[in-house]
Image: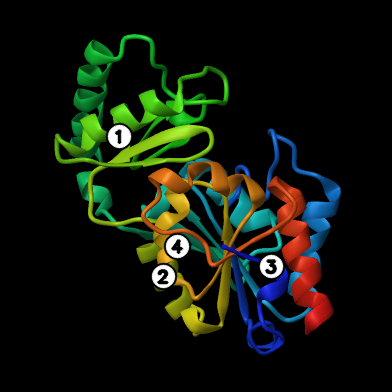
Amino acid sequence: MLPLSRMSVEAVRQITTLLFDLDGTFVTEDNLEAETYQSLERVRENGIKTIAVTGRPAGWCDLMARWWPVDSVVGENGALAYSKKMSKIERVNFHSLADKDSYRKRLDSLFADLLATFPDIKMAADQPFRQWDLAVDMAEESEISLQTAIEIATYCEERGAKASISNIHVNIWFGDYSKREMSLRVLESLEQEASTAVYIGDSPNDSPMFGHFPLSVGVRSVQKYKDIMANLPVYVTDGDGSRGFVELVDYIISTK
């Protein structure tokens, strides 16, 4: 991983879209700082489209798409996207809504099996607002070790599910998608290209994005996951969490 300062002036001047993770990147320790939010507004003021890409639930994404200075929100690790079009929210789901009930039964059954093997785990507090995935709390209101999180992910994958680890949750779902696939669909709908987009994140569930976007950035804490990630960001910020996000925005705007 290279220092952010090694991102070339030519590359920065071609950026038309900023995609960004939330927890551990835009939000630090459950705190959305004013400076961070203002940085997002500064990006928009400079003509750059903004897309939040998160593992957070559908219910949260609807609010963000309506109220935040973003063009779209990709949620539940790529299961859905909410985009603001002419003051209305356009919703895209990977799965058919007609399959929702049977899909939830599969997830509930898998969680019951998980509890039998990992009796101390708990669902994330935001689980009631989710449509398409199951979130096991890792470091938000209860704690499990990174090793246990890896074991949970492996357990689920051996049973045909997908699993991804963030800095706070282990997210579990059925379906061949990730943050990357839905982000590319959103970019296409906005008539944007991955080659002129930059992505910033912090944890293993950002790995598919790091592997696809030539301009990929990790905040400093991403380095602690380097041994378990298939793809690492090209660049890394000096600052951690939201300070890293602000650092990237400052670099983009000052260079443009």
Per the image, the residue denoted by label 2 is: 212
The quarter of the picture where the N terminus appears is bottom right
Query: Above or below — where is 107 with respect to 211?
Result: above
Relative image position of residue 191 (x, y in whole percent): 49, 85
Residue at horizontal 78 percent and vertical 79 percent from the top: 46
The quadrant where residue 198 appears:
bottom right
Q: How far is the residue under mark 3 from the one under mark 1?
A: 31 Å
Residue topped by disc 4: 209
In primary-sequence order, the first of circles 3 and 2 is 3
At mark 3, the secondary structure is helix
CB contact under 8 Å: marks 4 and 1? no
Looking at numbered disc 1 in the image, what kind of residue is underneath it? Ala
Residue located beneath label 3 in the image? 4
**Element under disc 4:** helix
- Kind of residue sitting beneath label 3: Leu
Vertical relation: 83 (above or below) 175: below
At which x and y percent is residue 197?
A: 56, 77
- Residue tagged by mark 1? 153
Q: Which residue is drawn at 74% across and 37% down?
A: 31
Question: As displayed, is residue 87 above or below residue 57?
Answer: below
Which residue is situated farthest in the left direction here?
Answer: 159
Q: In which quarter of the image is the C terminus?
A: bottom right
Q: Is residue 104 left or right of residue 214?
A: left
Type of amino acid under label 4:
Met
Relative to 100, 89 lies left or right: right
> Can you tell which quarter of the image residue 111 is in?
top left
Label 2 crowd (10 A; few <14 / some 14-19 / many >=20) = some
